[in-house]
Image (tube, helix red, strand yellow):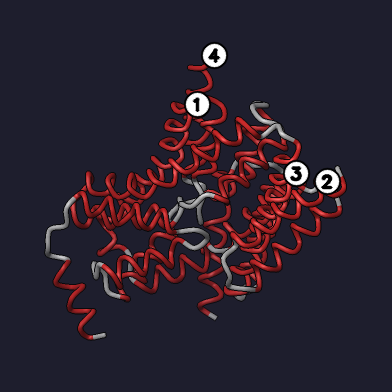
Amino acid sequence: MKDGVLGQLALTFAAMSLGAIGGANAVVPEIHQQVVTLHGWLNDTTFANLFAIAQAAPGPNVMFVSLIGWHLAGPLGLVVATIAICLPSSLLTFGVSRIRRRMMEAGWLKLLQTALMPIPLALMAASALIMAQAADHTLLTVVVTLGTALFVGFSNRNPLWALTAGGILGGLTFLFAGT
Amino acid sequence: MQERVSAAASSAQETVSYGSIFLVFSKIGLCGFGGVAAWAHRVLVDERRWYSDREYADLLSIGSVLPGPNICNMSIMVGDRFRGPLGAATALAGLLAGPLLILVCLALLYDRYGDLPVVQAVIGGVTAAAAGLVFGTVIKLARRLRPRFGNILVGVLAFLGAAMLHLHVLLIVALMVPLSLVLALRERQR
């Protein structure tokens, strides 16, 4: 059983590695589709909770994938999932780093950047929608989501403030309202 | 400024040990709450002087265009520059090791206390905020991009493919990258 999960983790995450333009947040809809809808490894709430924990920790956002690996198959799952999501894109980067002086002229790079930008943005918007559907069950959580979106979108302060505020609000509501 | 450029240029020839590559990227990984790229600039350009401002800008653009988090891609290119393939692996390992340890601690706490109602309430609040964080990042980046018609078309199609049709992300990227490039080239020619 466990070997089966490890193998499937490796395949699932390696297959989406090259799609993660702009980072792992672009593949959250794909991860949700595979891990929650198709395989049924996690339910919506756990999926959203693990995402939140990964956001609260330092480091690059691929660590959400590491955390899913940990949750499903322990330390080995963490290692397998992390390597799977990193390896294909890392090999591509390594190859490009070797040839970039000849291939990548500044003008081309700029064009490529403007052309690619809408794709990760759209995928991230889809991620946000999935996360909000999983996380927002009460009026308060909807307000927290919208408030954080405005805070992050229009100020340059550290987003960790908003995550902390969300946690405190959640805790206080529980203590005072008992819901 | 002149001094910084020459310092960065000369240090490119120096040998940098595996140890310092690992340490530098550990520091970037562990400090990078929220915005890793800002910390990478501070450490690579200001503190270590491995790169000039210009070289760093190139590094960041290439890292952002390639799939995977830009900081992971940058670590690979920096490690490779100083120490080849093994240096690239060392840099990536340094970047991930510290944060992964912290993450494991958080995961253990979650496994142990995640069922307590008050903890669930707190995590519920953080989760709602995390969804907003992703929305907010989209808003912030879209404001900087100042999208044209072609960008918006590609964005809407990619969003529908991911959110409504649940297409595999590789299929979305394979369809949208050529379309987006063609539209960008046409807009440039005008």
Question: What residue type is disc 3 on?
Answer: Ala
Calculate the distance from the C-alpha at mark 2 to the C-alpha at mark 3: 12 Å
Q: Earlier in the sequence, mark 2 or mark 4?
A: 4
Kind of residue at badge 2? His
Label 4 marks a residue whose chain is A
Alpha carbon separation for disc pair 4 and 1: 13 Å
Q: Which residue is drawn at 57% across and 46% down?
A: A27
Extreme residue toward the front, this view: A176
Q: Earlier in the sequence, mark 2 or mark 1?
A: 1
Q: What element carries label 4?
A: loop
- Residue receiving disc 2: A137
Query: Which residue is the site of mark 1?
Result: A74
Residue pointed to by mark 3: B121
Residue B106 x/y as whole percent? 54, 40
Seen in the picture, residue B146 relative to B170 is either above or below; the reply is below
CA–CA distance in space, label 1 to label 3: 25 Å
Give SS at disc 2: loop
Task: Name the residue nearer the viewer: A83 or B25.
Answer: B25
Density class for disc 2 (Cα within 10 Å; few <14, some 14-19, many ≥20) is few
